[in-house]
Amino acid sequence: MKIYLIRHGETKWNKESRYQGVKDIPLSEKGIEQVKKLGMYFSNLPLDIIVSSPLSRTKETADSIVEFYPKKLKVFYDDRFLEISHGLWEGKVVAEVKEEFKEIYNFWKLKPYEAKMPEGEGLHDVSLRATSAFREWVNKYRERDIAFVTHDVVIRVILMDIFSLPYDFFWKFKLANAGINVLEYDGEFKLLSINLICHLNEFSAEGVI
């Protein structure tokens, strides 16, 4: 089976380097264009079902795939694929967080797995809900091709968990808005592509986590 881990299209807050977390921010104009390209790209790929975070930015991304796909696709919404809760950081730009939460911000950059957002979550919390949900969906639909439409931190955590990577790797790669990560599963996971963005005709992976 093929598995696609897809990050949602750009939002205004992504562009502003503003922490979103679980705030329900819709796609920007650029994000809408990105997910149109994403939808057209997926129209030629094998796909049976979509599992999505319920936030607007992921719903809009999933809807675009459905719109362009040549057969009817079922979309399931699962709260366990919500982005990490950034707590008190949500709505603030990076510069504000660096100034107001200097100690925890530096710790987040140095030891991401041990850090926890003030009044929010840590990576361990995301791992407990998202990776377990991912394995559950994969096991339930083992003979089908699945797309998971979710968020930056969620995708990073799932990839590190299923490939047993140390969380020191958390900052070692970037994931673009509307980028695709492709896996194959035949009893064990194999990574085929990471941060695939050829459909976007752009090369940036901007955003904030």
Image: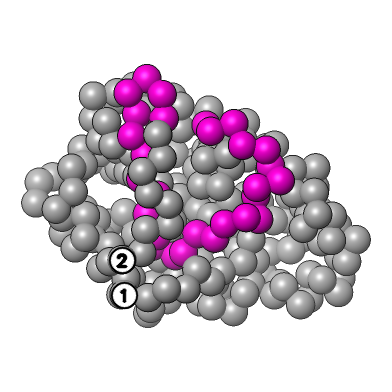
| Mark seen at residue 198 | 2
Q: Amino acid at mark 1?
A: Asn
Percent coordinates x, y for residue 5 in the rendering? 40, 46
Q: Which residue is mark 1?
A: 201
Q: Quadrant of the N terminus?
A: top left
179 relative to 151 in the view: left or right: left
In the rendered image, residue 180, in percent from the top left (x then y), is placed at 37, 54
Quadrant location of the C terminus in the rendered image: bottom right
Please give the range of residues in magenta: 162-189
Residue 49 placement (x, y as % from top left): 25, 38
Which residue is at a point 81% across and 54% down the rendered structure image? Answer: 110
The residue most toward the left is 70
Q: Magenta stretch: residue 174 in it? A: yes
| Quarter where residue 16 is shown | bottom right
Q: Name the residue furthest right.
A: 103
Mark 1, other Cα within 10 Å: few <14 / some 14–19 / many ≥20: few
For residue 65, the mark is none
Cβ atoms under marks 2 and 1 closer than 8 Å: yes
Examine the rendering and report whether any part of residue 49 can be seen: yes
The residue sitting at 82% across, 71% down in the picture is 98
Image coordinates of residue 174 in percent, x first then y, are: 54, 60
Q: Nearer the viewer, residue 138 or 13?
A: 138
Q: Secondary structure at mark 1?
A: loop
Is 118 placed above or below 20 here? above
Q: Of residues 80 and 107, which is closer to you in this image? A: 107
- Report if residue 158 lies within the magenta region: no
